[in-house]
Amino acid sequence: MSSLSRDDVAKLAGLARIEMSDAELVALSNEFTVILDAVARVQEVAGADVPATSHPLPLRNVFRPDVVIPSLSPADALSGAPAQEEARFRVPQILGEE
Amino acid sequence: MIRNSAFEMAGKLASGEITSVQLTQEHLDQISAVDTDVHAFLHVDTEGALAQAAAVDAKRASGEKLSPLAGVPLALKDVMTQKGIPTTCGSKILEGWRPPYDSTVVVNLKKNDIVILGKTNMDEFAMGSSTENSAYGPTHNPWDLTRIPGGSGGGSAASLAAFEAPLAIGTDTGGSIRQPAAVTGTVGVKPTYGGVSRYGLVAFSSSLDQAGPCARTVLDAALLHEAIAGHDPKDSTSINAPVPAVVAAAKAGNVKGMKIGVVKELNGDGYQKGVRNRFEESLELLAAAGAEIVEVSAPNFEYALAAYYLIAPSECSSNLARFDAMRYGLRVGDIDGASAESVMNLTREVGFGREVKRRIILGTYALSSGYYDAYYGSAQKVRTLITQDFNKAFELADVLVSPTCPTTAFKIGEKADDPLAMYLNDIATIPVNMAGIGGMSLPSGLADEDGLPVGFQIMSPVMKDDRMYSVGAALESALLSKWGAPILSSIPALAGSK
């Protein structure tokens, strides 16, 4: 039986950058007990000799000719920005004060 | 006119019996009349659609040679970017966002002069089977407004059944085109993975997502399929090969000598009786049309659902990291001195709905150190086993068939609190995405118990999409002879409908 505690879910939410209320953490932790039991079935059939498939197409590096084509104008690229300054994206502080 | 097929509309446009502006206006009128009840659309682009229609009419008047669907209107799933038109993916995090570019599907639609009416409702980021996960409220099934229209592409399917559009675009990651088609009595096709470009399709699970046509007839779906398919240098997973001859296959509808494999594991227990009855009848009709029916076994399909609910969440946890409140979309908590991380955390809390959060957390877990091999790694191995099952089955049969879904449309709210029960809807559609092959759903009749539409699923090998159109057209024609009228002629009239 697999399960995730409230604290486990809180850690995962932190990694996924989603703030969550205590009620949400508890609810998800309860749901995951059921969901993880269901998905853990994949472990029943997959032997060590079975290769993994990450993608339906057997593709390796796909190249196209290195030619210059039109791209978004700065105005278009910034058109959806929550905030901008001097034709740049304005973002919250990324590094600490120190 | 709005009850015609797209093919018939195209004929009337070509002969001059009607103009595209008139045809587009008729559909806009129908949307005004019924969409308050159905809620298939999130955005209706009245001005843009009429301008596009007028441009097609002008081209036609000047004698320009036009594509087969020129001037016919279409509804676009809100997961596809269209320049300048709001694209939300059914999520609050993208509310008000107007993309600065067209997806390749939209470029192809415009190239073919197909008129885009607006954007259709969907489960948030295509995660769901009922359209109840849309942040903008559910879409209602035109057959019974208290029921779900399927999902995630419930808006696209409902717009067809409500005669708001004769054509629509859907995307299918685990059944999001086919399951809505099944429960609304319409046709939906997931092409071979790589058959239609994903450029501008907002990514949920990149190795599974595939855009495709939704329509009311198999031929209409084929015409739309040809219009949107083909190699695209902007999508490195797009297949560089000719588009399968789907229109010719749909026109011929010939199954003589074809071997049709019934997948033993996708039927029986858990499938509603009326669903099984319609499936058996369809098999008899296909046999009478000259096909040979054989049984095939795919023993690993029973693990497909479990593998899907690891692979899709894993990929989504990575793909949805782009919604970081920095370059576009919602930004919450950007007060003086707030860190980027706190803004991101607060924005994603408010911007994402419950199911999206559930899947991101599940994916984060499945990919985390110490659990990767047991969950994501094992799921990838199951994916190999499922592909092997398909390969073996296609040695015995040209196409495979099953019911599209275990049940008909359930009531809105019925499964909203039980994610696992909701996931079971996709049990017959998911294997197709895992292997990247083609899949179609077309109506096979109404279930005896509840009088609601039932879907028949046809699966074809990679880049043999024409085969499912051959079988689909043959079955559609046999069913039409049996019924005397298309299935949607028995849909209850919506209040205000034309």
Image: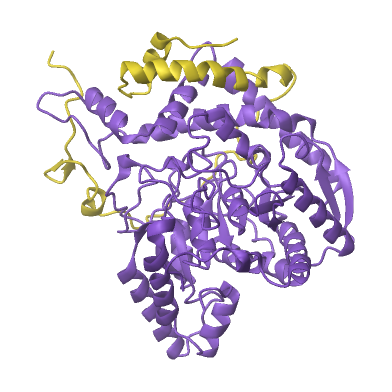
Chain colours: A yellow, B purple
B241 or B434, nearer to the observer = B434
Relative to B81, B176 lies left or right? right
Q: In this view of the protein, can residue B440 be seen by the observer?
A: no
Give percent across and percent down for residue B458: 73, 52
Q: Is residue B263 above or below residue B143?
A: above
Total tally of numbered discs in the picture: 0
Give percent across and percent down for residue A93: 16, 26
What residue appears at the point 41 percent right and 52 percent down from the top-left corner? B78
What residue appears at the point 64 percent right and 21 percent down from the top-left corner? B378
Relative to B34, A70 lies left or right? left
Q: Is residue A15 above or below residue B171?
A: above
B367 or B331, nearer to the observer = B331
What residue appears at the point 53 percent right and 65 percent down from the top-left corner? B167
Q: In this view of the protein, can residue B266 be seen by the observer?
A: yes
Residue furthest toward the left? B336
Give percent across and percent down for residue B425: 61, 38
B420 or A55, nearer to the observer = B420
Q: Is residue B9 above or below residue B400?
A: below
Give percent across and percent down for residue B185: 62, 58
What residue appears at the point 51 percent right and 53 percent down from the top-left corner? B141
